[in-house]
Image: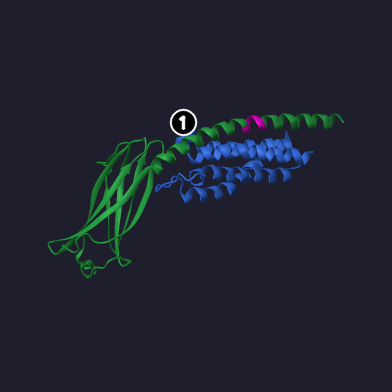
Amino acid sequence: MKANNGRAHRSSVVLAVMGLLALCAIGLTWVTAKNYLNASTAAARFHIAVSEITCEQENSEYVLGIGVDLRNQSKWDLSIISMRAIVYIDRQYVWGQNYDFMSNRLELPQGSERDTVLRIEVPYTKKEIVNRGGDNWSIRVSGLLDMPYLGSKLFVTHALIPLEGGHD
Amino acid sequence: MDRTKTVLGIILMGIFMCSLFTVQALPLLAPFGVAAEYGMVLVFLGALLTGFLLGMLTPSVAKGVFAGFASIVLGLILAGCVLALPSLLGIAGQLGLVSTLALERAVLFAVILTPISAVGIFIGCLV
């Protein structure tokens, strides 16, 4: 009987400690989740879109220009560390290029918009595909965005876009 | 009565583990800086503490191990819900904040943390 009472008392103490820990945990989760939702809202207000694609011939090589619109409607200052653009014509891979902004970051202050052109030099081996052309120019732009509190985060956008002004 | 107390213990420790998993997944958003550097240590200590308390609550080691596993899994499910909040509330944009890697890590956690909580359960049963 005495042992049972002792065990019941111990269970009550253990449950009380567990309850206290759970209460602290709820507070901790609440604060973290609130910060997380704020960060997610800021992330959701960052937009990237491919506006146009141009094709020029330079020294018998094609140079593609991909116009990218960047919008930061969040309340945080953001910056882009790196980007990667890949071009496909009629679902066929043409070429891709990396852009490193580590030393000179693309700054996006809060509420700002920025247009930038990513240039891709297509090697002569791919000349035929570009020459043949096609209506379905598909572009995939991805990159790393530096966010306060969160560090670098991946973004990606796809666009199916007609060639601006045809082959120049 | 014992079963009710065990279930209550599992739920309470599941909530406790959920906060540690959340802090570990989002260390830079946690209210204290320790989490950023010692997130993993906190999770391991949390699992040990969970095992210890459940070991003190349950009548046998086998039931304790099951309870420990259940509270870790409950913690992971709750943490998953917290991490999916932006998507559930419809505010997720082009930028994903939580990678699929985090979900794979959660499954690994369940496997790794159960033996650790079992150690705590043995200690709890001995006390």
| Chain rendered green | A
Residue A19: in magenta span: yes
Q: Which residue is mark 1?
A: B33
For residue B59, side relative to residue B119 (left or right) = right
What is the quadrant of the N terminus of chain A in the image? top right
The spot of residue A96 in percent (x, y) is 28, 58
Which amino acid is tagged 1?
A: Gly
Rendered view: B99 above or below B127: below
> Which span is picked out in magenta?
A18-22
Numbered disc 1: what chain?
A: B
For residue B57, side relative to residue B25 (left or right) = right
Q: Callout 1: 10 Å neighbours few (<14), some, many (20+)?
A: few
The spot of residue A94 in percent (x, y) is 27, 64
| Chain rendered blue | B
The spot of residue B73 in percent (x, y) is 62, 46
Q: Residue furthest left?
A: A59
Rendered view: A49 above or below B35: below
Residue A128: in magenta span: no
